[in-house]
Structures are given as C-alpha cells and as structure tokens.
Image: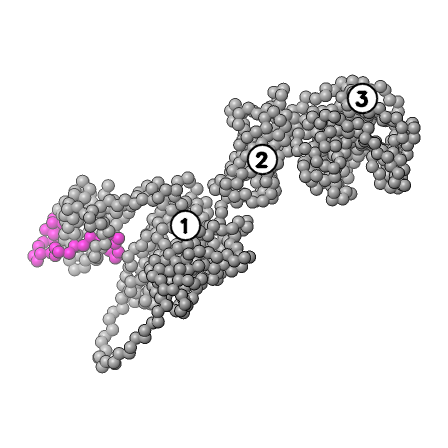
Amino acid sequence: MAGTITSFTSQPQSNLYIDGNPYNVQTAGESYSLTEPDSQTLRFEIHAGDPAWFDGSTIDRSEVQMNNLIAVGMPTNISYQFMVEPGATNTAPWLVTAELHSNDGDLGVSTSPPFAIEMQGEHMAVVARYGNPATGSVTTRTLWTDPNPIVRGQYYNIQIQTSVANNSSGFLDVYINGNQVVNYNGPLGYGSRTYWEEGLYRHTSPEVMAADFRNLTITTGSLPAPTTPTTPTTPSVQPAVTQATASPGTGIEHAGDVITLSLAFNEAVTVTGTPTLSLNDGGKATYVSGSGTGTLTFKTTVASTDTSTSALAITGVNLPSGTAIKDASGTAANLSGAVKTFTGLQIDPILPAVTQATATPGTGTEHVGDTITLSLAFNEAVTVTGTPTLSLNDGSKATYFGGSGTGTLTFKTTVASTDTSTSALAITGVNLPSGTAIKDASGIAANLSAAVKTFSGLAVSTAPVTPTQPTTPTTPTTPTTPPTPSATKPVLTVADHSLWVAGRGGKVDLGTKVTTTDSNDQVTVNITGLPRYETITDKLDGQTFRGDNITLTAAQVDSGLELHSYYRGGAHPTATLTLTASAKDPTTGAVATASPQTITVVDPRPATTTTTTTSSHHHHHTATNQQPVTTTTAVAPTTSQTTESTDHQHTAAASTGSMASQGFALLRQHFDPAASTLATTAAHPIMAADHPAATGTTMASFASQSFALLNQYLAAHTGHVDPGQFVAALSQATGWGHDSLLARPQH
C-alpha cells in the first residue's frame, strides 16, 4: 500500500520512513508532538511554546522533512490526505501545513518555500514564491483561497503536480477532492533543489492545533493526468479523544470553585445519556454539552470533601448503563486519550481559618504592667507576613509574637495605665496593615472571623493597687510538731469547654493547664471519653495518646495538648472528654482530686444547634446525631455533687436517694466498720449521712437492712432489681468499693 510508514519514531532529529524514503523528525519532542495512529497515518500536534531545536521562541513546529532532494525543473507528483482535528479556531498570523521547500544550502540564504498549502484563519490557501532571495527580490502570490472554512474532522484529498523552475517552464497544478483549484504556469522557486515537508508550522499562538496526514505518495518524472481519488474523502476512522484540556489550566482551586474539562475528538460525536469523568481528587466531572460536535464539555465543582492534590488529573471516563459516545455511523469512540494530568492545576479544598482563641492567664484580674498572651489556633499551618495585631476591648492592641509556619499564632499585650478597665477582656478584631498577611501554604488568606472572642473571668484593672499595711508582729508561739504532709488539690483550667475540629486530619488545641501550690506533689490529669477516631498529642515530647482512658503528667498537659481528628464520615459526631486532675503526696501517698471538667468536641462543626437533655438521676447527655454513651459512676463517701435542677426533683427520686444513702452507710459498716473509704473520686457520689450503725446491731442485721434499702432504691429508680448484683457484692466483700453496685448502668 502506498504511503506505508516503517521504523516510526517521534524522537527529534531521528528518521522514520515512508515508502522506504527517510524523513527527519522536527518537533519540540513532547509526547503529543508526533504519533502514529496507524501504519498509513501521522498525527501532528502543536501547543504554544513548541519550537523545534533549531527554531526561535516565536515558532511552534511539528513536521517531518524528506531527506531526498528533487532536482530543479523535475516534474513531481505529490498526493496525500489531510484532516484538521476539531479544536479552537486558528488565530496564528501564518500557518503552513505542507510545502515544497528550497534547499537553502544551494543558495547560501534562508528562504520561504516555493509553494505551500497554508491555513489563513480557518481557510485553506495555496501560496507560491519565486525570484532571487540573495538580493531580496522575491515575489509572493496567493494562487487560491478556499471561500469556505475548512471542515474540521473531515479528510481532504490533495493532489499536486509541479515543476519548480525559476523561469517560464515552471508550473503548479493543485486538485482538492478531484477539483482543480490552481492552474499556474510561470517562474516558481529560486533555481535550487527542493524537498517535501508536511505537518504543522506556525508563528506561535495560544490555541492547540492537531492535524492528520495519511497515504503520502511522491513520484518524479512523467506526470499522469490526475484521476479521481479511490480513497473516500472521509475514510472510516474510529472516533477517538485527541486532546483533554482544563479551564482554568493552572492555579489553585478551592471548595466551591468550578473547573471545566473539555475532550476534543477526531470527528463529531453524539452523546447519549450522561457520561462523567473520574478525577484524582475523588470528585467527578459531569457532561454538560457538545453532542453533535467534535468537543464535549464536562464540569466539576470542588467540594470540601475532595482530596488535596498538586496536579488534577482525569483518571477515566464513566459510561453508565444507557450512556454512549459514538460518531454518525454508530461507532463507539475510543476514550483512552481522555486520561490526562493537568500539571500546575492544584486542588486545595480546605480554606485556612481560626478555630479557637485562648488567653493566658485565662482568669483573674490583670493590672498595669501585667502581660497577657493571646493565642489563635488554625485548622492548618499558616504563614505570617508582616506584623498583625489584635484589637482589644480595653482600648489596647496585642502584637504578633510568633508561630508562623505552625497551626497556632501567639500575640502579647501588656496592660498600660491608659487602658480601659473591663470585667471581661475581649478580642474585637484582627488588624492586617499594608503588607501584612496570614495565609496557608497555597497562598490562601485565612478566615479570621473566629478570632473575635470574650474571655469571661479575665478582667483588666488599671486602678492603682493599694499596698497592704504591715501588721504589728505577734508574739511567736511555741512551735508545734509539723502535721503529716498531705496532698493539695490541683487546679485544672480549661480555656474553652466547647470545641470543634475538622475531620480528615484536622486538629485543635484543648487549651488545658494544671497547677498546684505544692511543688512536692505528683500531679496527673486523667482523660476519659476519647473516641477511636481522635488522638491527643502533647507538645512536650510529641507523644500521641489513644483510648478511652489515658493519664498524662502535669508537664505533658502544660506543654499543650493537641487533639487530632481522623473522622471521615458524613455525620456530626460529638465526643465528651472528662478531665480529672489528681495530686499525690510522694511521702504519705495521700491523694487529692479536683472536680472533673468536660470538653465537648464536635467533628465537624454541626449544621444545626446541639441540644442537651438531662434525665433525672442517670445524667446521660444526648447530643444531636450522637448515640448516648454509658457512663460508669464510682461511689465515694464525699459531699453529693448531683447536678439536677431543684425544680425538676421528684419526691420519689428523693426518697429512693435517701434509701440508697442509708443502704450504703450500712454496707460500709458491714464490710469494714473501722474504715469507710469506698473510692477516692466520684462524679455523682451518694452520701450515707444520717444513719449511723446502731450500737449492738449485728453484722447480718446491717447487711439485711442495707440490701433491703438498696432493693427499694433500685426498684424505684429502674423498675426492676438484679439480685445478681448483691450476690456478686457478697462474694467479693473486701473489694466492693472498686466495683460498686451502682457501677453498672441501670437501663
């Protein structure tokens, strides 16, 4: 078959062969520059900025050049088929598709081709030249311009008969689809040998251009009369994607941004149903238009749940049942060319934002000269340019101190005598003077609205502090034997009891501190309620903690605790963390425990308001979209800390509570009349207060009374009694304070 391609290569400066004749590859060397769809066809593609190795920056080129030279005046017959693929309109000042070029080595000067098949806009044209290029005397003539725009996706049969001679014996005849469009006789060329070139060669232009050449045949010598081509004008070719583009093509797209993706085909296609494109950020682009043309358009909107990626890519085309992309003959399109990575088009769905504002100290009254540190936590690391400040309601400003490149920025302010006293210091705004910015790694400015916050309990007073008058010394008393050291109850500070954190790797500072007035005590903080999808990391040594029950040292707590969420679901889970601070005297072993505090963590921020309901006696808190969590309650002989409102107490509940108190008092005497400690801490203890053991009552009587009272308590409180609880208690009498009868949920 004529025009057969062998030893194909796309490597610039290498040779491929057509009908056994060598052709040199002259392209930018890109993967798309030159391809071989089949053994008869070469496909050429150029983008803006695609010069060959010998071109300047204003040239885009993808061509093959015949190595064999044609003698001056040699009759030459050239035939081939040519198709411009669908795509953007040609705007290049000039564009050459095929030419018979002068061998400039014969002349010693660079020349333009003696004749060329060009595209002027969207119209084909035949241009001829002759004269003496050494003196600059060259005549250029446009011999024919197609009055109709080229039909993209359609092959044209082109046949050329010529003799390039710079005298009256020169001639040029051109036939398009069997119709003669040029019949020229006269000087042609510059009196030098020539060679054939085909492909795409233009002054650089922004649009992508692709063209196919097939069945090239070149003969020299006698010229037979042109015949009607036997190959159909539009050969049977499978429709296929020739190019995938994105708009915008570069930059960083965020949640809510729309990206348009276009697939160009080698012929018009018809769409049935709604195809989609799979993307590497986890999203999909949906078909919107283009059926009946050579370009299909798809659109996608970046979602907050999409995955960040440095280069968006189409990973596949999806054709659900009943969906198809075919040409007019019903042939399904080859969609493999749609897979493409758009280098420079990034996806960053998360916008940087303030998630929490804290103050140190968090409570108390600050006076003139005192320094207050304010911290802003973000949902990702941010970079600070310049010096931002925080406006405060006492009339002053807190100045940026540090934290650029991390997820927490710190600001400091010193109380001045000119400040306004206030009962609750507040941040009223963030100031970014000219040249100042707070942005994430992708250059997106942070949302600072959540920085506005009032710190209840943190007062500022500028009034002078009255010095304390010295008192008259008293007569020293006789020293007494120092008391046995005991533990001092530590103070646990929680900056914010309600936090939220973004899933998929978000983080938030818990804002907790623990202090003690006894430096000898060993202070720890126990945290319960941490769900499986969250972890806590201290900033002391970077240790990460997991699980429902963890204990940290005071140093770890004071270094700063950071909660990380890896939640990937679609709900709004709420976790309630219970924090209990304890201090232990290392000498006596005495332990003092502070009242537990809770922090509620919502992941992610719920769309609706969280509501809390409290049921009498059981203290189960239920949040919207959250399953209740059973709470184990230890029992301790300390003052009751029951939290129900007085207006919601019921007479029966009070009665049963009294019964339980009596039962526990009796049980304590039954198991160990001398020592009555049941547990060291309790969130909701029950006191045995007004019913001491009667003198002379037997241990069995105590037990009988206590069980009877507990039976009544449980029956009134739950509607049923589990005798197995009492049997278990009797069988483990000495350890019942650690496995309380009320430790089991009564549901």
Q: Which is more foreground, mark 1 or mark 2?
A: 2
Residue 234 seen: yes
* Label total for image: 3
User: What residue is disc 1 on?
Assistant: 535
Q: Nearer the viewer, mark 3 or mark 2?
A: 3
Q: Residues within 10 Å of mark 3 (few under 14, many from 20)?
A: some
Tell me what residue is drawn at x 20 percent, y 47 percent: 648
Reply yes or no: does residue 426 show up in magenta: no
- Tell me the residue that label 3 is attached to: 180
Which numbered disc, 1 or 3, marks the residue that appears first in the sequence? 3
Q: Secondary structure at mark 2?
A: strand
- Amino acid type, residue under disc 3 in the picture: Gln
The residue at the point 76 percent across, 21 percent down is: 177
Tell me which segment is drawn in magenta.
Answer: 678-706
Front in this rendered view, residue 41 or 546: 41
Residue 533, x across and y down, in percent: 40, 45
Density class for disc 2 (Cα within 10 Å; few <14, some 14-19, many ≥20) is many
Which is closer to the viewer, label 1 or label 3?
A: 3
When asked about the image quadrant of residue 711, the answer is top left
Say which residue label 2 marks.
261
Say which of 48 and 693 sits in front: 48
CA gap, disc 1 to disc 3? 80 Å
Which x, y percent locates residue 582? 31, 59
Q: Earlier in the sequence, mark 1 or mark 2?
A: 2
